[in-house]
Image (cartoon, rainbow, N blue to C red):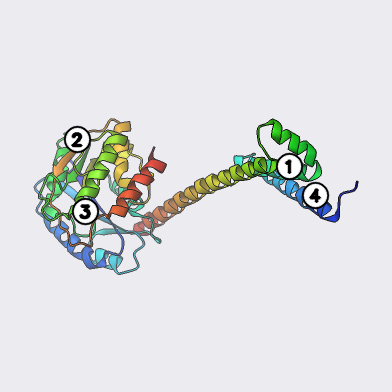
């Protein structure tokens, strides 16, 4: 029987400092996987002006390069397109800024592989939140309320970029927002197409430079109101 | 009484404007902005050529002064212009993204 295919999509913009480390950890974790999956790592360089492309290529990932910066949503969809070309059965998205722990990959993808959900969302609130700054916690709560009001999904960490999708979700979801607002689109699409969502606990690292800001949160809400509805 | 030179110049300018707007509206299939521009031009022309008629008309439809009616039309036209450009810009952004995606995927294949 042919092995199932798992692709990890990592969109990144000017992440030259961190992308090498992220990919190294990811390759190491995927090599040890006991799921008997054929794996691919797709890095989408979203028009970076630094050496992100070179470093990712050197690390051995499949690297796609946007000639100009189009936003994390657009880069993720480009990664999805490539994953579809590779006949992926499951796709994971994670951030390029080394915020997520590569070891959590299997925790995130397992419910999708087992058929418990069409899409899983990592939740920093179900895991260890001690390292998360207070203002980020407040911002997340506000965005959780936004998602609950607009899309009816009661999640604890709706803006987390560490997610897994099965092929059905990948084929049916239609992401329209190029910038960060795409992160909330998954809830609208899940509602429209009756897809099952599930949250899984993950760990996150913060150093003050990573993650979304309060302003990003406002932008996400605005983009979804103007574009998503 | 014959109109003075400024009025004649104004009428010529408006006539040119109306021809320009009509040409554009035909090409664009009469969108809200073009229609607004056309109404603005006609309203301005009527205000210059037939001030009494326009005054009476604006009072009948509920405006205290004809200038208020004219400014309302201008404001609506400006609104249509903004909305139209917003959607135009968004469509352009989407095409750029599609192009960037296509380029990225094709380049990777090579």
At mark 4, the secondary structure is helix
Across and down, in percent, residue B97 comes to 42, 52
* Distance between mark 2 and mark 1 Cα atoms: 61 Å
Q: Are marks 2 and 1 on the same chain?
A: no
Of the image marks 2 and 3, the number of the one nearer the N terminus:
2
Q: How many callouts does the rendering have?
A: 4
2 or 1: mark nearer the eye? 1
Mark drawn on residue B42:
1
Residue wearing tag 4? B11
Residue A88 visible in rendering: no
Tag 3: Cα neighbours inside 10 Å, few (<14), some, or many (≥20)?
few
Across and down, in percent, residue B38 comes to 69, 42
Residue wearing tag 2? A117
* Distance between mark 1 and mark 4 Cα atoms: 10 Å
- Write down the quadrant of residue A188 in the picture: top left
Tag 1: Cα neighbours inside 10 Å, few (<14), some, or many (≥20)?
some
């Amino acid at each position: 029987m042919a092995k199932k295919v798992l692709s990890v999509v990592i969109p990144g913009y000017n992440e030259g400092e961190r992308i090498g480390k992220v990919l190294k950890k990811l390759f190491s974790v995927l090599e040890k996987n006991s799921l008997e999956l054929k794996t691919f790592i797709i890095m989408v360089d979203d028009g970076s002006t630094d050496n992100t492309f070179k470093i990712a290529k050197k690390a051995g990932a499949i690297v796609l390069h946007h000639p100009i910066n189009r936003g994390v949503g657009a880069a993720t969809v480009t990664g999805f397109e490539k994953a579809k070309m590779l006949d992926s059965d499951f796709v994971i998205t994670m951030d390029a800024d080394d915020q997520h722990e590569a070891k959590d990959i299997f925790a995130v993808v397992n419910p999708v592989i087992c058929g418990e959900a069409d899409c899983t969302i990592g939740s920093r609130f179900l895991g260890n939140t001690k390292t998360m700054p207070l203002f980020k916690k407040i911002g997340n709560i506000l965005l959780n309320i936004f998602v609950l009001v607009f899309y009816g999904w009661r999640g604890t960490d709706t803006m987390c970029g560490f997610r897994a999708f099965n092929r059905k979700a990948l084929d049916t979801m239609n992401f329209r927002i190029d910038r960060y607002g795409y992160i909330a689109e998954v809830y609208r699409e899940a509602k429209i197409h009756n897809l099952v969502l599930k949250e899984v606990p993950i760990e996150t690292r913060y150093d003050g430079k990573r993650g979304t800001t309060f302003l990003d949160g406002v932008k996400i809400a605005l983009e979804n109101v103007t574009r998503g509805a | 009484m014959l109109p003075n030179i400024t009025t004649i110049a104004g009428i010529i300018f408006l006539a040119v404007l109306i021809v320009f707007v009509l040409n554009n509206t035909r090409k664009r299939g009469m969108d809200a902005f073009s229609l607004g521009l056309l109404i603005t031009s006609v309203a301005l022309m009527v205000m210059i050529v037939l001030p009494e008629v326009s005054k009476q008309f604006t009072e009948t439809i509920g405006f205290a002064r004809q200038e208020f009616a004219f400014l309302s039309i201008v404001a609506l036209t400006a609104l249509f212009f903004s909305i139209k450009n917003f959607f135009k810009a968004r469509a352009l952004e989407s095409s750029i993204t599609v192009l960037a995606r296509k380029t990225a995927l094709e380049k990777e294949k090579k």
